[in-house]
Image (spheres, helix red, strand yellow):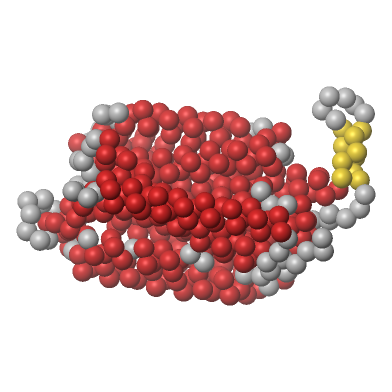
Amino acid sequence: MDTQSEDILRVWQQRSLWLAVAGLVLSAMLTWQEPDLVWRAYLFAFIACWLLTMGATGLLALGNLTGGRWATFGRPFYLSATQLLPHVAVLFIPIALCLERIYPWAATHTGTEHALAPAKAVYLEPSFFMMRAVGYFVVWLVVGTLLARVSRFDVPAAERPGMSRVGALSLVLLVPTTTFAAFDWGMSLEPEWYSSIYGAVATAAGVLAAQALAIYTASRLPAARLARILTLAGVDTAGEHEYRVSHSADEPVAVPRFQRSVIDVFHDQGNLQLAFLMVTMYFAFSQFLIIWSGNLPTEITWYMRRLRGGWQVVALGLVLLHFAVPFLLSFSRDVKRSPRRLARVALLVLAMYDVHIYWMIVPAFATGGLRWHATNVAALAALGGLWMMLYCWNTRRNLGRFPTND
């Protein structure tokens, strides 16, 4: 692996470690007198990391199934996140041990006053909940192992039938298990409410974030590393120059073939990010429109909690910064054909992804106040820093499988 890519990933890894340590210390300080706060904040941070991991796993499976330049180019980054599935499984253990402190229905089964409908009481029985969680992780770990075993960087997916078969099987298993896990771990925080599209909204958000992370990581790699990945993606980076027409004049301008290849591939990645952004927008707006137009008390309460008491400002920020601004910027050909500009859009998408999950999860708890919000930020820094540190380590290892002739 070349020194420049080694250095940037190593720097990210070290900074992520310090962020995780700082988040852990701050969480301990903020929750010293109220330990229940840390477990609720931990759930939010866990869901943010888990959905990002599942989004990358889904993209890896989809790329192995369909093949194509975009899949080969993004495979090392998708795989780096997929390889964190065992770590995510370990991070779920504190949630399993503290169900009564997090979920109201778990407290119901221990004798508190929160009543459940008979069907929901059966479905949300703690032992059945844990059986489903174990089943989810078994499926995901098997899928992740198979994907890591068959995913190759030295040949296109079309030349590896095993990659396509495993990719198809993985998608069949990932979609329902991830959807029901989102029901169990996120939607059940408010057991009186139900939405059949909740899992789709959460899953689409994770896929969008995973694509944004891959774009941002790739944009920071040096030219030698990108050249090797592009070559394996079937892009011709050899030759002296190509010519294109300048935007400011009709005279042809010489452009290095490698630079043109980088521009084309990032343009593809930007289009893919735009597609996932549109899917996320569609799911989120469909859920809002159906529930708001129905105006049923048992359904509208979920949005009422998130459109009052200051949360309406967060909702407006999501509409503008998570959807409208990236959506409009992604329509620009100049933005998508500039790795630096596209990386800025991807970074905005990643930041607002955390805000999106925050808006979906945190209002479910009655606890308020500045310290409560600071606890959530600290928990995200702890778990997110740990996740990012491991992601950088995996990326360094996976990119080391791309030999370059510097």
Answer whether residue 373 is visible to the viewer in this image. yes
The quarter of the image holding the C terminus is: bottom right
The residue shown at (82%, 28%) is 247
Q: Where residue 294 sits in the image (x, y, percent)?
A: 28, 35
- State the count of labels: 0
Q: In this view, does 166 lie above or below 370?
A: below
The residue shown at (67%, 32%) is 332
Q: In this view, does 399 lie above or below 42?
A: below
The residue closer to the viewer here, 89 or 162, is: 89
The residue shown at (76%, 48%) is 262
**Does 385 sit left or right of 181 as displayed?**
right
**Does 367 sit left or right of 50 as displayed?**
left
The residue closer to the viewer here, 381 or 236, is: 381
The residue closer to the viewer here, 300 or 248, is: 248
Answer whether residue 63 is visible to the viewer in this image. no
The residue shown at (21%, 69%) is 127
Q: Which corner quadrant of the image does residue 125 belong to?
A: bottom left
Q: Where residue 379 sits in the image (x, y, percent)?
A: 35, 50
The residue closer to the viewer here, 258 or 323, is: 258
The quarter of the image holding the N terminus is: bottom right
Q: Where residue 104 sits in the image (x, y, percent)?
A: 17, 52
**Does 74 sit left or right of 174 as displayed?**
right
